[in-house]
Structures are given as C-alpha cells and as structure tokens.
Amino acid sequence: MNEAAHHKDPTGDRFGMWLFLFTELLLFGGLFILYSVYLARYPEEFVRGGEELNLVFGTVNTVILLTSSLAVAMSVTALQRGKIRLTLWLLASTIASALIFLVNKYFEWSAKIHHGIYPNSPELTARSSGENLFFGLYYLTTGLHGLHVLLGGALLTWVFFLVRKGKVNPDDFVTLENAGLYWHLVDLVWIFVFPLYYLIL
Amino acid sequence: MAEAFDASAPDYRGFWVNTSGRSGLYSWLFTTDHKRIGLLYLYAIVGFFLVGVLLGLLLRLELIAPGLTIVSAQTYNAIFTLHGVIMVFLFIIPGIPAAFGNLILPIQLGARDVAFPRLNLFSWYLYMTGAVLALTSLFTAGGAPDTGWTFYVPFSTQTTTNVSLAVFAVFIIGFSSILTGMNFVTTVHRMRAKGLSWGRLPLFIWALYSTAWVQILATPILAITLVLILSERLIGTGLFDPARGGDPIMYQHLFWIYSHPAVYIMILPAMGVISDIIPVFSRKPAFGYKAIAVSSIAIAGAGSLVWGHHMYTSGMSDMAVLVFSFLTFVVAIPSAIKVFNWITTLYQGSIALDPPMLYALSFILLFTIGGLTGLILGAAGTDVHVHDTHFVVGHFHYVMFGGTGFAFFGAMHYWLPMIYGRMYNKKVATAAWGIIFIGFNVLYLSMKIVGMQGMPRRYYDYLPKFQGLNVIATVGSWILAIGLILMFVNLFRGLFKGEKVGVNPWGGASLEWTVPSPPPPENFDEDPVVTHGPYDFKGAGVL
Amino acid sequence: MSSKEPHHIVSYATQVKVWLALLLLTAATVTVSRIELGALHVWAALAIASVKSALVIAFFMHMKYENRAFKYCLLAALVTLATFIGLTFFDVLYR
C-alpha cells in the first residue's frame, strides 16, 4: 500500500479535524436555530421550563467539563515534554470526567422522567406549548450532546491505549491533539447549552 | 518499482495491476487508492442512476394518460419519492465529486493520493450502506415512503410508510458527502505540487474546492433535520406540531437551508468540468480564469443565502419573501459570469467537436435555459403561479440533468479514456449524444409548457386538456432512454475493448494529462514541478 | 518533509490560568442570570459564553498558534451559522 510513502503532515491532520469540528458546530447549530426561534415566540414559557431544570446538576456538569478540558489540554503539553505517565493520568482523569458527566445526566434525566416530564408525556402535553417545545429541545440537545460525550470518552480511551503502547508519542502526537480537539468541542457545546437551558431565569 | 510500470510496455496497465497483496475483489474492497475508490463510486453511481431512470420511465408511463394508468396513486407517490431520493442523494450530489473528484483531483494537484485515503474508503462504504438502506425502504415495513424526497411535515411525521428507514439512509449518505468534502479541502490546501499556486489550479479544482466547503457546512443541517424527523416519528417531540406550539414552516427552513446549497453541490463540480473541457477543445486558455475561479466561491457563498425561495407560498412573512427573492437574483450573477466567460473562451478558438465538447456545449445551452426559468421561479410574483407545477419539475431537470447530468456524461467521455487507457467509438458517442439531446428537450420542454398551463406536480392524475403534452413528454422519455443506453454501451465497450490511447489523447495542459493512460498506482514517478498554467497549451508543449 | 514541525508547547501555567478564567466567567454567567435584564438576558448569556468559547478555542484548542488558514476557515463556519440564524429571523420576526 502507498501508506508508507506518505509524508506525515500533522498540520494537515489537525486541519482536517477542524473541518470535522465545523460540521459538529453546524449540527448543533441547527438545534440552536430552532431554539432561538421558539425562544423568541414563547419567552415566558421557556423561562418556566428553565426554572424546572436543576441548576446544581447543570453547574456541576459545567465545571466538570471545563476541568476535563484543562486535563486533556495539559495532557498534550505533558506528552510534548515526554512525560508519558503524567499524560496517561491526565487522559484517565478526562475519561473519568466523561463518565461522571454521563452519570449526572442519567440522574438528571431520571428525575425528570419520574416526574412525567419527557417528550409526548401526558403531563408535558397538558402544559403550555412553549414548555413542550422547551423540553423537546432540551432532551434532543442534551441527548445529542451526551452521545458526543460518550463518543469523546471512547475516543480518549482508545488514545490512552495508543499512548501506553507508544504509538502516540512525543514525535507523533497529532492523534492525541485531534482527540483533544473533539473533547473541547463537547465542552464548547455545553458552554452554550448551560446558559440557554439552565440559566433562562 | 519503475520497471513494473513502464508505460511503453505492451502489457502496461498502470494502477489496474493488483499491487496490494490481496486477491482480486479484496484489492478493490480494501483499497485506499483514490483511483480505485473513484471507480467504485463510478460504478455504483451509474448503477443507481439507471435505477433512477427506470423509476422516471415508470412515472412517465403513468402520466401518458389521465387517471389510473399503470399504478395506484399510492404507488405513484412512492415512485416519485424514490426517484427523487435516488437521483438527488445517490446520483447528482455525489456524482461528479465522488467519481471524478476522486479519480482526477489528486492527479491534477500533482499528489499521490488524497489527504486521508482510509477516510476516503470509509466514505464509499457509508455511501453504499446508505444506498442499500434507501433501496430497502422500498420493500420493508409500511411500504416505500410517499412523501416526496423533501419529506415535508406534517405528512412525513404521520405517514405509516417507511420514512424512518429512508431518512436514516439519507443521514448516512450525508456523512459520506461530509467526509469527501473534508478530504478534498485538506488535500487542496496541503498537497499541491511545487509551483502549483492557487492561481494555476485547474478550474475543476476551484469548483471541487468550493463544493467541498458547501458539503462541510451545509450537510450537517440536513443531518439534524433528519434526526428531527426521526425524533418526531419515534419519540413524539412535537417540535413541528402546531397543536403543541411547533411550526411546520421551521421544518421547511431547516430542510432548505441544506437543500438549496445542495443544488450548488450538484452544479459547481459540473461547471468545473465544463471549465476544463472548453479550453482544451478550443485550443485556447480559459478567458477570465480569475472571474471563473472567484465565481465558484461566490456561488458557494451566495447560494447559502437563498433557501427561502422554495417557500414563497408556505406562509412565511412577506419580509422574508422579499429578502429571499432579492438574494436569489444576486446568486444568478456569478453563474452568468461563468457562461459569458465560457462563450468568450470559444470565440476564435479552434473548435474540436469531440464528444466531451458536445456535452460541454449543450450544457451551456441547457443550463442557461434552466437558469433563466429559475429566475421566473426566483421572482416571488411569478413563482406564485408556477409553484408546485410541472414548470418547477422542468426547471430543475434542465439544470440538474441538462446541467449536471450532461456534465457527468461529458466528464466520462473526457477522463475515462485516460483512466482505462482505451478510447470509445467517437461517431457512435456523437450519435448517442444527439439522441439524448433530442429526447431530453422533447421531454422537459413539454413539461415546462404544461406546467405553465397549470398542471400540478406529484399527482398521478391530471385534467384531460394536459394529455397532449404529456404524451409528447413520455415519448421524449423513451427517446432519451434509447440515447442513454446507446451512450453507456458504447462508452463501456470502448473503455474495455477499444483502441489503446497513449499519453494525453486530447492535448490538455493540466497535470492529469502528463501521466500515462492508465496512470501508475502512485500517479507520478517523481513529484512534479509545475511551471505553467493549466490551460497554457504552448507552455505544456501540446500546441 | 520531516514530521518534526516546530510546534508551540502551551505551558501548564497558561492552561491553568485559562481554566481559572473560565470558572470565573461561569460564576459571572450564573450571577448575571439573576439580574433582571428582560430581553437583554439572552444576549448577555451569549456574550459571556462567547468569551468562554474564545478562550477554549484560542488556548485549549491551540488556535492562537495555528496558521491563518485555520482562523479564516473558522470564521467562515461561524459566519455561515450566523447567516442561517439571521436570515431565518427575517421570516420569524415579521410574521
């Protein structure tokens, strides 16, 4: 195969990853388009919906994601400096953060569902239009985001093992950078989800 | 390495020789060679095109007489839905970029492959998976989708037909498109040969580059729109349900925010093919190279601003109707610039009417007709009379078929001899072109007239006064079909059994014409250095 | 071409400082949400979120140290999304 003849191009690899991140930006952007339209139409009802969301869960999850972004960013520096064990610890803590985030989400959603708030539920349908739309968008957006947290965690786990095997190393670490970029995107989406859903007070 | 691919050897077959270490079929299914991937796409795309043509012929048979002719109303709805889904998502959108972009782009750039070869193969698998799922939806569960390829709510969220599977299939195909776009943008930025500045790129590359950006930025909106349909159908979120505060017009916004730029994904690469063919067969450099290059970017950009012109009668605000109508006229300008530059390139050129040129010249005529009828549709006042009539159907077949379709056929006749190393019968190819051209115009001109007279689209039935033109159109479809069969048979017969061609059968000046026919596996023995422009025939030594 | 490119290493100190700024901005956005701002509310939230994003993109995602092509392309993507939202509002606001 002609792979071996290929000259490595980490800048090109990062560039390609950014292009992929643009698609994610536009993907979530579509949901934000819908959100912005319905917020403009049903401002008070969106506020009522927002008040029902658990601010503690939201804030804790925000801090978790921001800290996990720090960890993965530091892991790149650590690898560049040849500190393999530190890199692995930082990656492990990022993956752990992903898991904690998902566990929090599970509790958050369970509580809502237990109270009868889920798409097309009798309780929700009986409420105002704006609240129906708010929670429909809430579940879709946080669900899609949660899926990306899961995928990001899986990706970082794979990279963890690549670092351990030495396949990703101080001379060839664009795979770690790219996995990190994906994780930062997950963080970026949440940076907007948090105020638009939890702080719409 | 170099001896195995000695182009002067009588048994030279370039990249067709299996060097992968895998046996026969697997050397294709696990290839990362862009040329093989391009061919995998080509065969699939042509195959799905033929399925789409068959469905189109069935539609025309139903419409040869008013009332129920050969199928039930429900079946008719399913046929035009699948015709649209297959033609749009499996033929026209991937067509030129996936087949010819993959075959030619790296060679035109002086590269050995694209930036991400394994991702490229994955793109093809995504395309095939989506295609199989789309075809499966014809036969499973609630029956073939009957919503039209546009899947408008509320019908698409309520119909019991297999919308969910079809929509999921399109979602997967969309990812194929996105990955191809990412690959091409990165390749153009990072892998150009020495001396190949942006100002020396073939116009085909400028076209593919602009297209790739639209693929990257617009397709995700389609993805989320499809997810929303699934969400409405499967969990009942009610985001487009007026009873729960939702707005069905928002579906149309989200759908067309992708689907209008999608038509530029369809036409830009086609324009790129024409821009490459015309100079070669006029033996003159492209007139207005910069204008053509910039207009590709301009079309990509401006094309993202006009989606509302599909929605004039939907109930959106008058302000939106005004804004989108105005912007639609703006986007016509860069397209017109291209047409003027092509014609000026022809002026005082030494015209060779080989098959690629015939398709290019007829493209200019047919695309212009389609484009001008687009202005009638783009102007809100006139649109109100022809919206959802066969006038629209005629319009988009002129631009998508007379435009992109003809450019696809032209690209086949232009580049495939270099890829296969053999030439088809040019006389038969010319005859096939003539038959296709006649059949095409009989079919679609009739359609436009009957649309102006008021015949609605997507109905199996119509008023008896429309029958005359419908009969003519159906006969046109048969002439067209005969021409297509003749074209494909002649082409593929020639490519597998025809006379061998040497290097540069057409006298082109861009890099793909410096390699033997077929190209060797890594395209170039040494990395090329470019010293002249892509249409500098004197500089390339072919004039 | 060698695979060793001169690649800027972001110091731990910079990264921690950015993280602290992000936490502060998070506290700010929670605080601001409690102030009666009416319609300006969403814009304030978006403004703070944008500053946070800019920090993540510039430092954690390394954009500050990438070449111009990266930055122009990001701008193109952002302008595209803004355009989609903006043009939709020509409909929604004027119904």
Image (spheres, rainbow, N blue to C red):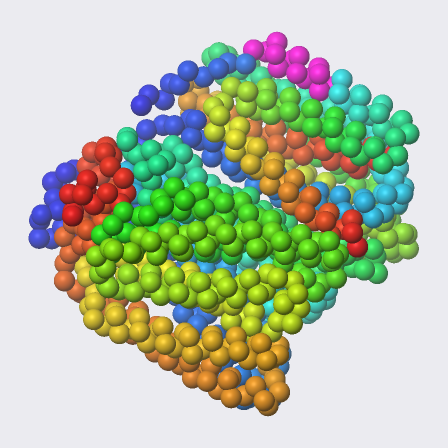
Residue sitting farthest toward the front: B348
> On the image, which quarter does residue B497 sit in?
bottom left
**Relative vertical location of residue A31 with respect to residue B360 in this rendering, above or below:** above
Taking the image as drawn, is residue B506 in sight? Answer: yes
Residue C68 % position (x, y): 49, 25
**In the image: residue B381, left or right of residue B370:** right
**In the image: residue B167, left or right of residue B364:** right
**On-image quarter of the C terminus of chain A:** top right
**Relative vertical location of residue B449 with respect to residue A14 in this rendering, above or below:** below
Considering the whole magenta stretch, tell me its main secondary structure.
helix
**Relative vertical location of residue A137 with respect to residue B458 in this rendering, above or below:** above
At x 39% / y 54%, what residue is drawn? B340
At x 46% / y 66%, what residue is drawn? B369
Q: Is residue C16 in the magenta section? A: yes
Q: Is residue B113 in the magenta section? A: no
At x 44% / y 63%, what residue is drawn? B368
**Relative vertical location of residue A169 with respect to residue B27 in this rendering, above or below:** above
Taking the image as drawn, is residue B227 in sight? Answer: no
Task: State the residue in front, B440 or C28.
Answer: B440
Residue sitting farthest toward the top: C13
Residue B231 % position (x, y): 70, 54
**On-image quarter of the N terminus of chain A:** top left
Task: State the residue in front, C58 or A63.
Answer: C58
What span is in magenta? C11-23
At x 22% / y 61%, what residue is drawn? B352
Residue C42 % position (x, y): 80, 34
